[in-house]
Image (cartoon, coloured by chain):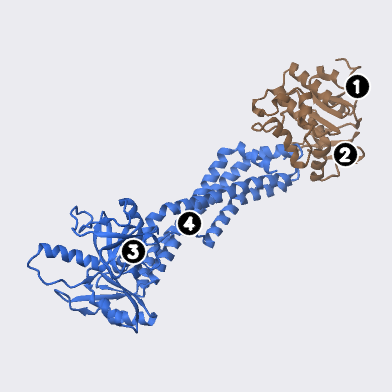
Chain colours: A blue, B brown
Amino acid sequence: MIRFALKNMAIKKVQIVLIVLSIVLSAGIAVLAFNVSNQVSDGISQNAKYYGVIIGPAGSETQLAMNSMYFSDEPLGTIPYSLVNELSMDGTNVKEAVPFAMADSYNGASIVGTSSTYLDGKELKTGEMLDDLGVFEAVVGSRVAKQNGLKIGDTLYTSHSATSAETHKKGIKVVGILAETHSSYDNVVFTQVRTLWEIHEHEEGENEEEDEHSHEKTVCAILIKAKNESSAMTLIEKYNGKVIEGEEKPISLQAISPMSAVRDVLNDADNTKYIVYVLCAVILVMNIMIISIITLLNMYHSSKEISLMRLIGISMKKINLLYLIQNSIIGILSILLAFVLSRICLALMNDYVSSMGVVLNIGRLYPLEILILVGVFLISVLPTAIWTFAMSHKDSISD
Amino acid sequence: MIEIKNLTKQFQNETAITYSDITFESGKSYMLLGASGCGKSTLLNIIAGILSPTSGSVIIDGESMSQKSQKEKDKYRIKNIGYIFQDFKLINEMSVMDNINILKLEGVNTQSAPEVLEKLGILDKKNSKIKHLSGGQKQRVAIARAIVKMPDIILADEPTGNLNFAIGEEVIKALVEVSSGKTLIAVTHDERLGKYFDNIIDMNEMTSGIVDIIPSKEADL
């Protein structure tokens, strides 16, 4: 039966290819959109859960969160490093205070000054992690290493900006290369925060003789692992809106909960997500109509074939079964291809999405995706089932 | 043995055909001769269970076909009747063997197909698509499909209708040869082919109330 069904399908390969393409595209797009939007939401929320509070200069909450967690956007400004020490002393509320400074560039890659804690959970491909007591050491993101052919022991020279050709005279030695994460970490060079200060002090000392006193040490943000949620709330209340003395002028601080900042971003993303869902639904409904029309036209043309089979004595039961097998093969093939297509697109989108600090897991399958695929399969089989069921209720074969 | 008793068929356009009682003996070949519209094909379709009679009955080996449901008639036809159609009823895009193997859907053993095709002289075409065959070859494939299941009865509706006389004669010779020992009823309008059959029945007489089965040797062909 299956062999004959396959032979019968080979006769109608053009129609079948059209049906399969139509199902694969619509189901593939629907599954992909659903998967990506959910993985991005989950991924962003996951990153944000890692820290309870972020303290930085006053300004946009989103900019502070996105810059200090995903290296996107420019830093809002700087705050004194002395705050890190102050926070580290707060044993009641603070488990760990991690400095974050972003300055300079290496062939387009951002340089982040921080402590080894910032890279907790990240695997090294080769070399070793940052030594918090050391200086002029770099742990390089996998893509930066690949693009620049960097290896352990190499020295890299940074510049003030991505567009500047002039580099700092003092180099940073590569001590470690991170394993590929498919996230924004791949595009960044990490070093001790002290390295950034010393590079700039060294340059300023050489160039500016009038400025003899050393500058105040600053960072762009402080990421805090709070003891608990209540500690986080206490810290936010304490530091949000606080004005502290700066080197030249007073600095206004903001303290944010990364989760709530990210939630704001996700709320905006949610609206986009709903638009994607509506579009997917429209595509699926159109697809139901296209599949139904193509299948029914196909069956109408097949009515000649069906009456021929009936005339030579093939029972309607067998004919029903034959067409159900044919459509099931089409349905199964289509949803498998749709699934494969969605996973290929997922892999291709990974680099783009990684700029948000989210790694798309190709193996991640949501229950609703299965539901969409099963639904599409049923849609592809149902018109045939209805048609053949209606035909089988005709008793006379000469009609 | 096929017995036709008090058989009538009325169509929706109110055309009615009344058939005289007649018996087709097992193992004999019959040619039904007559003008278009005299009810030759209708009779074959009623015997095959494709059409239902308005009244009367068709009794095959003591079993009344008229009392069977369509499913039972279909089942009987696939098992016991080989039907050959004027327009072949073949799937053009499929090969000769695929057109025969379609019977496997109903559990028919088609192992004898190569042997039957050889007898009909088209074994070399077994993998050719129907659309690439000539009319005579297509009709031979239709005959092979009807014969391969070893039916007791072979019904042929105008098997030479789409063929010229020379090819039609070849086809009829082949049909009669492969149907040897079975009940063969063939409808044709060409009386020159009558010599290949055991008996000739003039359908014009049959439907006007008189039936005369003439052995072909005695017929004036």
Closest to the camera, between mark 4 and mark 2, is: 4
Q: Secondary structure at mark 1?
A: strand
Q: Is residue B132 above or below residue A169?
A: above
Residue at image point 39% right, 67% down:
A47
Task: Give the residue type at disc 4.
Answer: Ile
- Residue, disc 3: A70
Q: Position of residue A155 (x, y in %)?
A: 26, 56
Task: State whether discs 4 and 2 lie on one chain.
Answer: no
Task: Give the residue type at disc 1.
Answer: Ile
Quadrant of the image containing the C terminus of chain B:
top right
Label annotation for residue B56? 2
Closest to the camera, between mark 3 and mark 1, is: 3
Per the model, the C-alpha gap separating discs 3 and 1 is 100 Å
Q: Is residue A240 above or below residue A170?
A: below
Residue at image point 26% right, 68% down:
A193
Closest to the camera, between mark 1 and mark 4, is: 4
Q: Secondary structure at mark 3?
A: helix
- Residue, disc 4: A362
Quick check: marks 1 and 2 in contact, CB under 8 Å? no
Q: Position of residue A99 (x, y in %)?
A: 29, 71
Q: Position of residue A147 (x, y in %)?
A: 32, 51
In this rendered view, identify the residue nearer to me: A99 or B154.
A99
Q: Is residue A25 above or below residue B147?
A: below
Is B138 situated left or right of A202 in this image?
Answer: right
Label annotation for residue B84? none
Q: Alpha-carbon neighbours of circle 4 within 10 Å: few (<14), some, or many (≥20)?
A: some
Task: State whether discs 1 and 2 lie on one chain.
Answer: yes
